[in-house]
Amino acid sequence: MTPCPNCQSNEVYAYKETVPFTGKHVSYLPGLGTMFSAAYVKPVLCAECGLTRYFAQDDARERVKTNGGWEKL
Ligand SMILES: [Zn+2]
């Protein structure tokens, strides 16, 4: 996850846990969570430029392959 793909800094931090990737009324990874919760992601932030990335956990990455709402580019 280092260096940062935007500024090449090595001041990149990852949150130690995964967190639900959702807002109050929106899911940012629609269809990839479970019936009971949103998909989880690990946030990674560059302390130099602020670029923030979210990495979906394994089960969401597997579901994207078969969920009809997502298309492979
Ligand atoms: Zn950066």
Image (cartoon, rainbow, N blue to C red):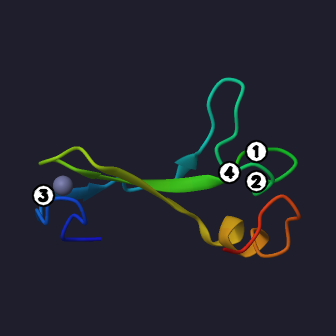
**Local crowd at mark 4 within 10 Å, few (<14), some, or many (≥20)?**
some
Q: Secondary structure at mark 2?
A: loop
Residue 41 percent coordinates (x, y): 54, 55
Q: Which residue is mark 1?
A: 37
User: Quick check: marks 2 and 3 in contact, CB under 8 Å?
Assistant: no
> Residue flagged by tag 2: what amino acid is it?
Gly
Q: Which residue is mark 4?
A: 29
Q: Secondary structure at mark 4?
A: loop
Q: Which residue is mark 2?
A: 33
Q: Is the CB of the residue bearing disc 3 within 8 angstroms of ligand 1?
A: yes
Q: Quadrant of residue 6?
A: bottom left
**Local crowd at mark 1 within 10 Å, few (<14), some, or many (≥20)?**
few
> Residue flagged by tag 3: what amino acid is it?
Glu
Badge nearest the viewer, 3 or 4: 4
**Local crowd at mark 2 within 10 Å, few (<14), some, or many (≥20)?**
some
Q: Secondary structure at mark 3?
A: loop
Which labelled disc corresponds to residue 11?
3
